[in-house]
Image (tube, rainbow, N blue to C red):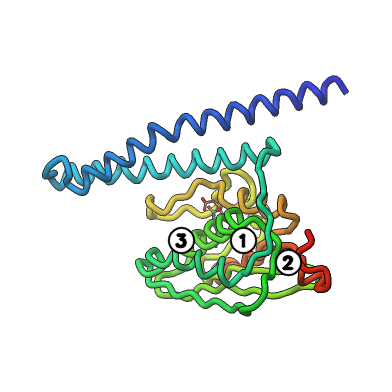
Amino acid sequence: MEKTRELETVSQAKNAFLASMSHELRTPLNAVIGFSELMLDGVPGEISDEQRQCLSDILSSGQHLLNLVNDVLDLSKVEAGRMELKLENLNMADVINDVVQTVEPILGKNRLKIEVSIAEGPPQVYADKTRLRQIFLNLLSNAIKFAPPGSKLGIETGREGDWYQVSVVDNGIGIKKEDQERIFEAFCQVETLPDRKKKGTGLGLLIARQFVETMGGRIWVESEYGKGSKFTFTLPLAISDIYPEEGNRR
Ligand code: ADP
């Protein structure tokens, strides 16, 4: 019992440390990113091609580090039980349209199309909008990263019993059976992409899983190596869909 309490205290201290560290790291990182962007735009003066190359490297490393810091901050909040959820009835069509608009420029760059099948209508899920957006962005950025240029991605949605189910589908490189559970662990990256710029943090799926589970759902992957992947998550139905006569009582 004594040991359990001790471990809890250590874990709390670790999470508090990670949270404040991540927070403190963001300010200088934003300066690194902001000033390299400024210099790349030529604001302080002309730069040579060689300097441009160096600055681009500083910028992409700074952005990578910022993503990592943000991910660690999110995870430490979940682990410390300090992630506050703002649960509300949400319309999936609105959330998806918004997310698709956000990723549109990267889709275009990779000549990718996205097919969304979703029914318009009353709210379908009871969830936190910001976290739901983050789940989509994490799954979509992977799909974009691993899909062949010129291919088509899909977002499929539907009701499954008492749950609302959403899938993000790609026909990219796929994931071997033995890796399909492992990829949800921290820093697990099974495929190395030749393009260094595409390298992620290895925390995206863990965060998606933590967010989905905190909101009461489940997330899993079905994939055939070499053929493509389908990541599916469930969320509780909007309250009016389960108990239509009770409206928005929750
Ligand atoms: P990151 O994408 O930042 O590396 P994630 O936690 O999001 O981290 O993903 C972990 C690993 O799972 C990836 O590095 C990749 O090996 C594998 N993976 C995730 N999504 C896909 C996908 N759609 N297709 C193929 N492999 C994937």
Where residue 89 appears, x then y in whole percent? 68, 63
Q: Nearer the viewer, mark 2 or mark 3?
A: 2
The residue under label 1 is 176
Work out whether mark 2 precedes mark 3 in sequence or the reverse, and give the earlier one: 3
Quadrant placement of the C terminus: bottom right
Question: Residue 224: x, y in percent?
Answer: 61, 68
Label 2 close to label 3 by CB (< 8 Å): no
Q: Nearer the viewer, residue 191 or 82?
A: 82
Q: Quadrant of residue 88?
A: bottom right
Residue under circle 2? 238
**What is the quadrant of residue 79 in the picture?**
top right
In what quadrant does ligand 1 lie?
bottom right
Check disc 3 and report the residue beneath it. Answer: 145
x, y percent for residue 209:
66, 52
> Which three-letter amino acid code belongs to the residue tagged 1?
Lys
Q: Is the CB of mark 3 within 8 Å of ligand 1?
A: yes
38 vs 173, nearest the viewer: 38
Q: Residues within 10 Å of mark 3 (few under 14, many from 20)?
A: many
Sequence-earlier tag: 1 or 2: 1
Task: Judge left or right: residue 49 versus residue 126.
Answer: left
Q: Is residue 219 left or right of residue 133?
A: right
Residue drawn at the location 40% of the way across and 74% of the way down: 150
Pick the front one: 204 or 237: 237
Q: CA distance from mark 3 to mark 1?
A: 17 Å
176 vs 91: above or below: above
Quadrant showing the N terminus: top right
Identify which amino acid the numbered label 3 is placed on. Lys
| SS under mark 3 | helix
